[in-house]
Image (cartoon, grey):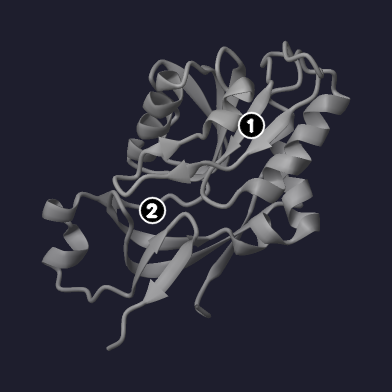
Amino acid sequence: MKNYVKIQSARYPDVILRAVPGHFITPHAHVNYYLDFTPLKFRSSEAHAAAKALSSVHYFSTPVDTIIALEGTEIIAGHLADELTQAGVLCKNAHKSIYVIPPEYSSEGQLIFRDSLLPWIKEKNVLLLFSAITTGSNAAQAIESLRYYGASITGISALFSLATSIAGMTIYSIFSQQDLPDYKAFSADKCGLCESRKPVDAICNGFGYTMLKA
């Protein structure tokens, strides 16, 4: 996608988000921008900058044993673990280090963790890291799944989030609607873009997009 705009974080100028206007379908909504996190998630220098930005809100207030890296955020999560470890964040696991775990998904979208991973999830302080939170459905589903496995959710972070809280917990994000004021999310049955007969450009999720052929 070529027609994107670059949005620089007001607080963290080294972190840049690319936003593509159009009509896009996500697993939970129709949106008028595709948020391209590809450089942030897969280029080491940009992932490190994003991690430093996120770590600043967790230095002293959030105990973390494990980071659950959702939607392809593993590289950022690795840098975030390093930043938090250097800051001396409280860990209660035996190794006093932070684990980074990308989840497995069921066909219904529920998070799955094999028995071999449970020692770093059950009764541990878990930080969730998302690329984007729009309707909050993905975050709610992840929280429900992890609580089923006995995790204690101590923090929620995202590169971009429309919501500021969920399940009584603050969502810390680098970018918000203040950075992209005209960003809109619609339910599938009440989509203003569909009502105006704007063609769908692509189907997308936290891992990327698939263009629809004209």
Q: Give the residue furthest to the bottom.
A: 214
Using the rendered view, name the quadrant where residue 140 is placed: top left
Q: Is residue 40 above or below residue 76?
A: below
Residue at the location (61% across, 48% down)?
73
From the top left corner, tell me how far across and down residue 46 is, in percent: 75, 55
Residue at the location (12% across, 65% down)?
195
| Mark-to-mark CA distance, 2 and 1 | 28 Å
Q: Secondary structure beneath disc 2?
A: loop
Q: Secondary structure beneath disc 1?
A: strand
Compare marks 2 and 1 and give the one earlier in the sequence: 1
Please state if 13 lies on the left or on the right of 106 as rendered.
right
Residue 183 — which label? 2
How busy is the neighbourhood of tag 2: few (under 14 within 10 Å), some, or many (20 plus)?
A: some
Residue at the location (40% across, 20% down)?
148
Please state if 25 lies on the left or on the right of 81 as rendered.
left
Q: Which residue is mark 1?
A: 67
From the top left corner, tell me how far across and down residue 213 is, in percent: 31, 86
Please state if 162 lies on the left or on the right of 76 as rendered.
left
